[in-house]
Each structure stands twice: as C-alpha cells, then as structure tokens.
Amino acid sequence: MKVSRKKFSADFKAKVAIEALKEQKTIPELAIQFDVHPTQIQSWKKQFVEEGSRLFSEKAVDTKRQDAEEARLYEQIGKLQMQNDWLKKKLQ
C-alpha cells in the first residue's frame, strides 16, 4: 500500500509558524492540534523567522515592477486601439 505525503498550503504553514512563535503552547501541543510532526513545526518556524523580513523588502520592489508592467500594458492597449481604428477605416 502506497502512503502519500501530506501537502500543506503556504497559509497553513504560516499559521502554524505564527502559533509557534507566540509560544502560548508548546511545540508538541501544536503538533497534536495541527496534526503535524513537531520537527516540521520547528522547520517552518525557523524558515518563517529567517525569510519573514524578505516579505517587507520585496513588497516595494513588487510595487515598482507592477507599475512598470501596468504602464507597458496600457501602451500596448493604446497601440492596438490605434491599429484597430486604422483597420476599421481601411475596410470602409
């Protein structure tokens, strides 16, 4: 019989890591509550602490990237509208 691995969403991992960081319950208690191995909780907690600051630093970069992409798309829409109008005039 094949045993499949459990796959957890990023939201679930973050929720468990935050609960572990709160330290209101022990890791074994959280493991029972969330049905996850204690070692896995420690791993997620460590990963959350190490990479959590990246969330805030990348937000500004993502905003700039989104603005540039948005400007490029609006430019492309404008060109396509001009081409569409030109083709409509040619067909008449």
Image (tube, rainbow, N blue to C red):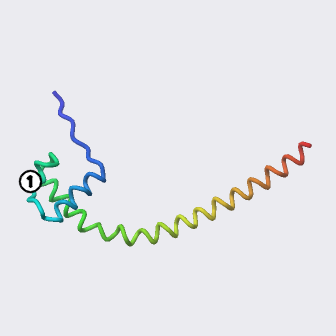
Q: Position of residue 46 (x, y in %)?
A: 19, 64
Q: Position of residue 37 (x, y in %)?
A: 12, 49
Residue identified by numbered label 1:
29
User: Please, which residue is most extreme toward the front here?
Assistant: 24
Q: Is residue 19 left or right of residue 52?
A: left
Quarter of the image where the C terminus is located: top right
Q: Is residue 4 left or right of residue 60?
A: left
As drawn, 34 above or below 47: above
Q: Position of residue 23 (x, y in %)?
A: 13, 64
Q: Is residue 61 left or right of residue 37?
A: right
Q: Secondary structure at mark 1?
A: helix
Q: Amino acid at mark 1?
A: Glu
As drawn, 54 above or below 1: below
As drawn, 64 above or below 20: below
- Could you tell me which residue is drawn at 12 percent across and 63 percent down? 24
Quadrant of the rendered image containing residue 73 = bottom right
- Could you tell me which residue is drawn at 52 percent across and 66 percent down? 65
Q: Is residue 5 left or right of residue 27?
A: right
Q: Position of residue 55 (x, y in %)?
A: 35, 67
